[in-house]
Image (spheres, grey):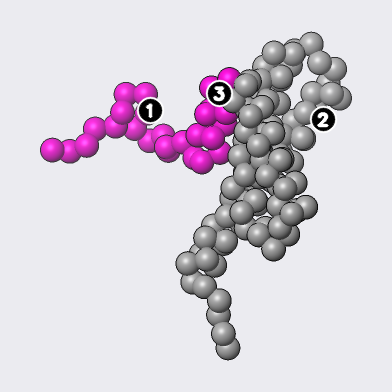
Amino acid sequence: MIAQPSPARQENEEPPGLYEVLSARARELSDGALWAATITGVVVLTAVIVMRPGWWEVAFPFVAGASLGAWGLSAHYLAWRGDSLPSAQRLAMVIGQWFIAAIGTTALIGTGYAIVGILIGPVQS
């Protein structure tokens, strides 16, 4: 049997990318869940920095979660007040979203490197 394209997409349309999937998920989450993700990430990052700076690998996934929460909260705010915001404030929010996305992306890449580093173990030359 030949696989048929899903009816929601056109035949020549690419599947959604990672950023599209994550942004759609962040828009679907409640404000409480987004606040929880953001606060948890910040608290874990702060605890790692203060108590165990050598465990920096542990903070990466929490920073990524905090970024998802912060991005989702800003998307909710823009959807709620976007049309009534002055253009300079709206531009600042969009730039902030790009900055948050860059932090989250860096944290995800760091998570991947940390997992590989843990799996490989110490390298001795």
Contact, CB < 8 Å: mark 3 with mark 1?
no
Q: Is residue 4 visible?
A: yes
What label sits on residue 95 in the rendered view? none
Outermost residue to the top: 84
Residue drawn where x is 58% and y is 88% of the image = 125
Q: Is residue 88 above or below residue 95?
A: above
Mark 3: few/some/many CA within 10 Å (<14, 14-19, 20+): some
Which residue in the structure is indicated by mark 2?
92
What label sits on residue 9 in the rendered view? 1
Residue drawn where x is 55% and y is 80% of the image = 123
Outermost residue to the bottom: 125
Give SS at disc 2: helix
Residue 36 in the image: state x and y as whole percent.
63, 29
- In which image quadrant can residue 7 be found? top left
Residue 51 in the image: state x and y as whole percent.
74, 54
Q: Is residue 44 above or below residue 110?
A: above
Outermost residue to the front: 51
Between discs 3 and 1, the one toward the N terminus = 1
Verify whether residue 32 appears in magenta: no
Residue drawn where x is 52% and y is 66% of the image = 118
Residue 99 in the image: state x and y as whole percent.
74, 41
Which residue in the structure is indicated by mark 3?
29
Q: Is residue 72 visible?
A: no
Between discs 1 and 2, the one toward the N terminus = 1
> Start and end of the magenta stretch?
1-30
